[in-house]
């Protein structure tokens, strides 16, 4: 009898669901027909008005032209007042964007849990298992609390941002100069990056709602878009070349070796960031291996950065020191002649050869390897110390040899 009663309840729920679907379908069809009739009536009214206006224009073209001009003026005035009354949309801060993403994710998770709870209640009636239902109810309550908390934080942040904006508007505004081509290009890139961020946020919310497994890559895409927007905003906020003082030191052009080192440094930093993200989402069994790989990647990135700095410093040292004349003063002919007659007290440094530059880079990398082994030795166990000490002695010997060879060349 109990099974029969349960089956009857299930049958009633199924029939009720079918009835609701049929009712919704009928309502949609009725709305569609009503909209179609309304559109047909509007079209007929417009065509009749057009016919009347055409007949009036044929009767009196001057009056028709005056009426059209008045209609255009009224439409322009209405559009202008609507534009003026419309509040300007403020840009969201980084914190507001973060809260918005978290809020959409929490809402999607709450909807997903609510659907799972409905399905679990339906199956619990048949199986008599209420433990999963209680757990889902608890999870749904926690998610709703989280949504309310994030919504309050977002509202408070928006209010504080509007207060700051109003206080900024009351202060005296300086006339902004016309934007240069580079600034216009940066503005366009910023708008495109913001559009890409919105698209990535929507894709992330949809993936979470549909329980897609590709959420990690979408989260990474959202973070990359936010980082790109920040970098573009920093570039846009910097003063242009005309506004900056002319005391900036001219940079020497980078050679092929420096460009190659710069690319290797960027790749090493990217590898470090990739491992950090992998550690954040890894399980207990993979943490030790990933941490070891992260340490090695960080050491490699530090070595490449030190090698790049050493190479750039060597380029700056080899650059000839040009004499700096006064800002608005040209030396006279007599001063030039006396300057040519006097021997220079300082001897100009000769530029380093390619072999010397190569030795300098290798010496910097050897010193970095010594420091790396010293750090590893400081945290190593007793069974590894002998091997690490031997490697450290070899690395120090190699660093000393590279230093001696460099001094011999210089």
Image (spheres, rainbow, N blue to C red):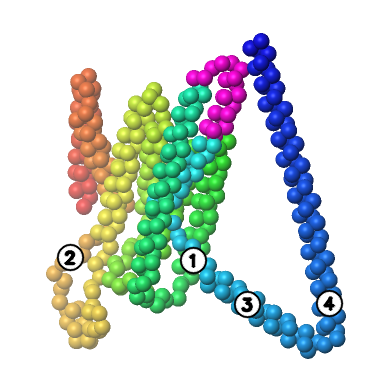
Disc 1 crowd, CA 10 A, few/some/many (<14, 14-19, 20+): few
Q: Position of residue 127 (x, y in %)?
A: 59, 16
Say if the magenta span includes residue 382: no
**Distance in Å between CA atoms under marks 3 and 2:** 76 Å
**Distance in Å between CA atoms under marks 4 and 3:** 24 Å
Most common secondary structure along the magenta stretch: helix
Say whether marks 4 and 3 touch (CB < 8 Å). Answer: no
Q: Is residue 35 left or right of residue 340?
A: right
- Disc 2 element: loop
- Disc 3 element: helix
**Distance in Å between CA atoms under marks 1 and 3:** 20 Å
Tell me which numbered mark, 4 or 2, is placed earlier along the sequence. Answer: 4
Image quadrant in which you'd find residue 70: bottom right
Residue nearer the viewer, 13 or 203: 13
Write down the region rendered in magenta: 112-131
Q: Determine which residue is flagged by label 3.
A: 76
Q: Determine which residue is flagged by label 2.
A: 347
**Res. 88 mark:** 1
Q: Residue at x 21, y 29 (%)?
A: 379
Tell me which numbered mark, 4 or 1, is placed earlier along the sequence. Answer: 4
**On screen, 281 above or below 95?**
above
Residue sticking out furthest to the left: 345
Q: Determine which residue is flagged by label 4.
A: 52
Tell me which numbered mark, 1 or 2, is placed earlier along the sequence. Answer: 1
Say whether marks 1 and 3 touch (CB < 8 Å). Answer: no
Residue nearer the viewer, 352 or 110: 110
**Distance in Å between CA atoms under marks 4 and 2:** 97 Å
């Amino acid at each position: 009898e109990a099974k029969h009663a349960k089956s009857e309840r299930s049958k009633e729920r199924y029939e009720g669901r079918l009835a609701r679907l049929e009712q919704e379908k009928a309502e949609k069809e009725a709305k569609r027909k009503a909209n179609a009739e309304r559109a047909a009536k509007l079209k007929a009214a417009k065509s009749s008005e057009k016919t009347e206006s055409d007949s009036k224009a044929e009767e009196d073209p001057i009056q028709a032209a005056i009426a059209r001009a008045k209609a255009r003026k009224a439409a322009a005035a209405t559009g202008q007042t609507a534009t003026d009354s419309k509040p300007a949309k403020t840009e969201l801060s980084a914190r507001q964007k973060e809260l918005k993403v978290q809020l959409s994710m929490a809402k999607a998770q709450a909807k997903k849990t609510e659907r799972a709870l409905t399905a679990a209640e339906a199956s619990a009636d048949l199986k008599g298992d209420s433990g999963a239902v209680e757990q889902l109810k608890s999870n749904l309550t926690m998610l709703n609390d989280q949504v309310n908390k994030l919504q309050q934080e977002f509202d408070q942040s928006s209010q504080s941002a509007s207060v700051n904006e109003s206080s900024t508007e009351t202060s005296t505004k300086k006339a902004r100069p016309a934007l240069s081509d580079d600034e216009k290009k940066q503005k366009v890139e910023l708008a495109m990056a913001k559009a890409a961020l919105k698209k990535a946020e929507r894709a992330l919310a949809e993936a979470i709602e549909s329980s897609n497994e590709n959420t990690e890559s979408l989260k990474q895409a959202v973070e990359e878009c936010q980082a790109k927007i920040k970098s573009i905003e920093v570039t846009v906020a910097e003063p242009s070349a005309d506004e900056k003082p002319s005391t900036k030191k001219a940079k020497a052009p980078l050679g092929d070796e420096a460009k190659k080192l710069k690319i290797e440094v960027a790749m090493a930093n990217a590898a470090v960031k990739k491992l950090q993200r992998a550690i954040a989402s890894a399980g207990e069994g993979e943490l030790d291996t990933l941490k070891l790989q992260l340490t090695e990647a960080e050491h490699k990135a530090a070595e490449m950065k030190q090698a790049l700095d050493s190479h750039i410093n060597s380029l700056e040292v080899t650059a000839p020191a040009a004499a700096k004349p006064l800002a608005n003063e040209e030396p006279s002919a007599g001063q030039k002649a006396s300057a040519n007659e006097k021997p220079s007290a300082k001897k100009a440094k000769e530029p380093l050869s390619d072999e010397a530059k190569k030795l300098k880079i290798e010496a910097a990398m050897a010193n970095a390897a010594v420091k790396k082994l010293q750090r590893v030795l400081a945290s190593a166990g007793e069974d590894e110390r002998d091997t690490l000490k031997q490697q450290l002695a070899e690395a120090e010997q190699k660093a000393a040899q590279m230093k001696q060879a460099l001094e011999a060349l210089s």
